[in-house]
Each structure stands twice: as structure tokens, then as C-alpha cells.
Amino acid sequence: MSMRWHAVVLAGSRPGGDPFALSMGANLKALIPVNGVPMVRHPVEALLNCDAIATVTVLAQEAERIAATLPEDKRLQVRTSAGTIAETLLSLCDDPETVWPLLVTTADHALLTPEMVRDVCWKSTRSDVGIGVVSKRRLLGRFPDTKRTWIPFKGGSFTGANLFVLRSDKVRTVIEVWRSVEQDRKKVGKLLWSLGPSLFFQAALRRLTIEELLHKISVRLGVSIRAVRLSDPLAAIDVDKPSDHQQVEAILAGRQ
């Protein structure tokens, strides 16, 4: 793999505090302890240990607090983020100093490994946007009790993996669309309707595979979007609730 990516770790916090973080003894989700260290440190170290990654930028509203928990490395920087994920990504598109392509992940991806990073990067080389996904069959085949949000398609259901490859500032169009549903995921149906009634009904009736749906959206937006089926189902497990935290700590303990 000759190309190298520039990683972005989103470590922002919700306005008014995060109830889950507070229940875990931290007032920032990124600082929830996972196996004895702040959660954000796990994905950052995985990225620094991956030969596909040239630099790592962590974006957070409370940048100084996050920076104090991370290792010192000349490839790593921590910067202040915008108010929402979409606004943060749009600011990257508008920043002339942004170096592309980007790999975007989140602070709660505590199970991230260099192998997962290489997998999503390598499989996204021919698209403007690569979206990491894991199939229900693969994840439940290994962890049948795992609770995820599944999106049904023709041929199977998928969940996201909080791994995105962005090729250039051309992805601004996609981010603008995402911003319209960012605060209310229930608006996704409305979003699909805005792209055309035919597309909406085909998706709702599960007449499209995930690849077919993203191809149709790509044509409408003029940006190539690809679903990247990840080899390791653990890529779909992040830390969003106490049961996730318990499961992730057990998995990490098993790696040691």
C-alpha cells in the first residue's frame, strides 16, 4: 500500500453533558476509562501503529483535556472542533491546509486495530467516500447477544463501523446532505424521498442491495459512495452504553 491516509478522530461532546459518560465517572465521553486508560487513547494508538496512516488529528471541543491523555508523537495533533460532526467535517473541507485523503473515525472506537484501518482504506481507493459497514450475519455469528442498529437491505442487514474514507473536498456535497439529518436520524426517510420517490420506495421495500442504493445516491449527488464490507466484525462494536463498555473491556482483555 503506497498511498497513505491522514486520520481524523472525532472526540467531541454533546451539549449539556453525556449521561452515559457521567454514569461511567467521566464528564467527557472520550475520557471514559476503558481497561484503565481514557477511551480515546485506544483508536489513536491503533492509528499511530498503522503503516497506512501518515498523521493523526484529534478534534474535540475541549482539546486541551483530550491532549493531556494522549501519547506524545510528532505525527499527532489535537485541535478544537466545531459544534457538530457535520460542521467539523465541513470546516476540514474548507481548510486549505487539509491534506487528503482522510480516514475519519471516532473516539469510542476502542476496538480499532491497524488491520481494520488498512482494510477500509484499501477497499476505498476507487471511491470519493468509503463507508465501513459490517453485516449482521458476520457480527451475530461471532457475538449473538450484541445489540446494534441494523439497516435492512435486499440480501442482508448492515450496521455502521464508524470508519469513513473521504477522498477530497468533493465530499462536501455528501456532508451537506448528512447535516440535514444529523440531529434527527428519523429524517433519513425524508432525505431519501428528497432524492426521488422511486429511490425512497425501492429502499423502503428492500428492493435494493446496499451497493445498489449507494450507487443510485452517488449518481444523484455526483459523488461516488461505496459501502466497504469490513473483514473483522469487531469493527462494528463501539462504546455507546454500559453493556458495550463491558463487552469491549472483555474483548480487549482477551487480546492481552
Image (cartoon, rainbow, N blue to C red):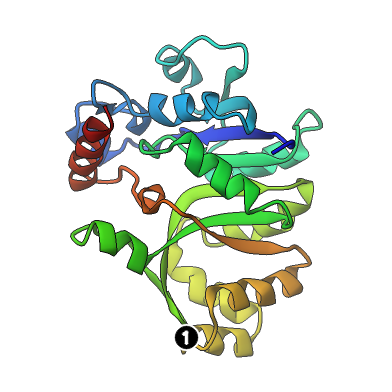
Residue at image x 40%, y 24%? 41
x, y percentage for residue 173? Answer: 73, 58
- Confirm whether residue 171 shows in the render: yes
x, y percentage for residue 239? Answer: 30, 42
Q: Quadrant of the C terminus?
A: top left
x, y percentage for residue 3? Answer: 74, 37
Q: Quadrant of the N terminus?
A: top right
Answer few, some or many: residues within 10 Å of disc 1's Cα (few below 14, many 20 plus, some between 14 and 19).
some
**Residue where numbered disc 1 is placed:** 206
Residue at image x 37%, y 30%? 30
Residue at image x 50%, y 70%? 188
Q: Is residue 192 above or below residue 91?
A: below
User: In the picture provided, is 120 more to the left or to the right than 98?
Assistant: left
User: In the picture provided, is 41 more to the left or to the right than 169?
Assistant: left
User: In the picture provided, is 195 more to the left or to the right than 3?
Assistant: left
Q: Is residue 153 above or below residue 167?
A: below
Residue at image x 67%, y 59%? 174
Residue type at mark 1 is Arg
User: In the picture provided, is 95 more to the left or to the right than 174?
Assistant: right
| Nearer to us in this view, 55 or 239 | 55
Q: Quadrant of residue 36?
A: top left
Q: Residue furthest front?
A: 1
Q: Is residue 19 above or below residue 139?
A: above
